[in-house]
């Protein structure tokens, strides 16, 4: 449904009604909960009063300002509403971060190192892991659909095991467990292996569902013209399964990008590890944590745009 399409729900058709309801709800909330907070007392002091009545008045003023903002935005088209709310929420978050009295010079001095070392390592680990997980997922999906009891048993055990354990535990098991068997692995390979095996298990089910969505007649027709299994998968099945597979696979990659922060526990110099290390030296933890949070958010939004373009490409071909 297009963003500007009118919805039949009367509450959505008439946002002023929703604003009126929110007026009462937020006013009650602020009266009951906000007046006794430290921020409420600060507002009351700046307005010249320190008693409960003054604090309640400040709370009511904020509530009316909030609802008035809702009413004003409701007069604009949906797209403008979305942009306005995004900008206002971003401003609120920026104001929230400013409460911590961040050292901008410290952030600026460490930003390039975070990007050149931490961001590069994060992207490298995530890209390598998703590539390996893709291969594992295709192999696992084919095995689960093969009808061979041995292959099905191995694939189902693999997906059950690695979907059943926390990712952090898998990181420790690979990094600390393999040396006990005589296989010493570095921190980066161990992190990539853990991410690949964990997300490969989840993606196996995604690819299995995508392959099963292709009618059996496609398989039969491909075999009838003499195509081998590899050619059938590469030319017939996977291209048709792509519209089904790509959206959840993109979501898995975004989740993996964030979960790559877990490999920091074994000393990989990715964003989370550097944020803790750089912040600990001067006890400026919030500067580094907030900076890394913004970097993760920007990366996620960029990946969402890429994913949307890829999905649009495949929808246009259908």
Image: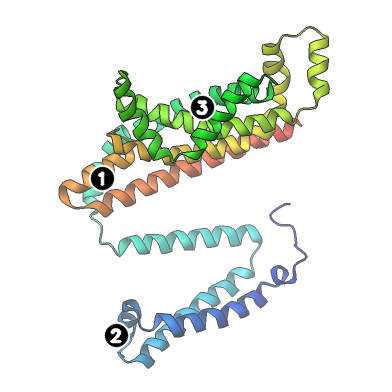
Select label 1 or label 2 by which is in front.
1
**Distance in Å between CA atoms under marks 1 and 2:** 37 Å
Q: Which residue is mark 3?
A: 133
Of the numbered discs 3 and 1, the one sitting upstream in the chain is: 3
**Distance in Å between CA atoms under marks 3 and 1:** 28 Å
Q: Which residue is mark 1?
A: 276
Does 241 sit left or right of 105 as displayed? Answer: right
Select label 2 or label 3 by which is in front.
3
What percent of the width, then of the height, locates residue 37? Answer: 34, 79
Q: Are marks 3 and 1 in contact (CB under 8 Å)?
A: no
Closer-to-camera residue (232/216): 216
Mark 1 surroundings: few (<14), some (14-19) or many (≥20) residues within 10 A: some
Does 130 sit left or right of 231 as displayed? Answer: left
Does 120 sit left or right of 162 as displayed? Answer: left
Q: Which residue is mark 2?
A: 45
> In terms of secondary structure, where does tag 1 sit?
helix
> In terms of secondary structure, where does tag 3 sit?
helix
**Distance in Å between CA atoms under marks 2 and 3:** 58 Å
What percent of the width, then of the height, locates residue 304? Answer: 54, 42
Residue at 33%, 39% in the rendered image: 271
């Amino acid at each position: 449904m297009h963003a500007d399409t009118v919805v039949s729900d009367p509450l959505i058709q008439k946002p002023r009604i929703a604003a009126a309801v929110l007026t009462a709800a937020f006013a009650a909330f602020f009266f009951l909960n906000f007046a006794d907070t430290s921020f409420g007392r600060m507002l009351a002091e700046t307005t010249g009063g320190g008693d409960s009545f003054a604090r309640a008045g400040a709370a009511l003023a904020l509530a009316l300002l909030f609802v008035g903002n809702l009413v004003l935005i409701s007069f604009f088209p949906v797209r403008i509403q979305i942009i306005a709310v995004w900008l206002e929420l971003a401003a609120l978050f920026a104001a929230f971060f400013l409460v911590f009295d961040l050292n901008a010079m410290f952030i600026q001095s460490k930003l390039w190192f975070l990007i050149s070392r931490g961001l590069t390592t994060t992207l490298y680990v995530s890209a390598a892991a998703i590539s390996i997980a893709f291969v594992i997922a295709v192999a696992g999906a084919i095995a689960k659909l093969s009808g061979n009891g041995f292959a099905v048993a191995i694939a189902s055990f693999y997906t059950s095991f690695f979907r059943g354990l926390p990712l952090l535990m898998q990181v420790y098991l690979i990094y600390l467990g393999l040396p006990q068997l005589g296989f010493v692995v570095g921190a980066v390979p161990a992190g990539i292996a853990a991410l690949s095996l964990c997300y490969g298990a989840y993606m196996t089910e995604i690819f299995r569902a995508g392959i099963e969505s292709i009618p059996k007649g496609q398989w039969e027709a491909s075999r009838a013209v003499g195509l081998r299994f590899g050619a059938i998968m590469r030319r017939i099945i996977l291209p048709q399964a792509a519209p089904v597979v790509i959206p959840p696979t993109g979501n898995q990659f975004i989740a993996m990008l964030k979960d790559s922060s877990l490999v920091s526990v074994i000393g990989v110099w990715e964003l989370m590890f550097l944020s803790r290390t750089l912040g600990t030296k001067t006890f400026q933890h919030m500067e580094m944590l907030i900076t890394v949070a913004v970097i993760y958010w920007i990366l996620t939004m960029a990946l969402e745009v890429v994913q949307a373009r890829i999905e649009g490409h495949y929808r246009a071909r259908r």
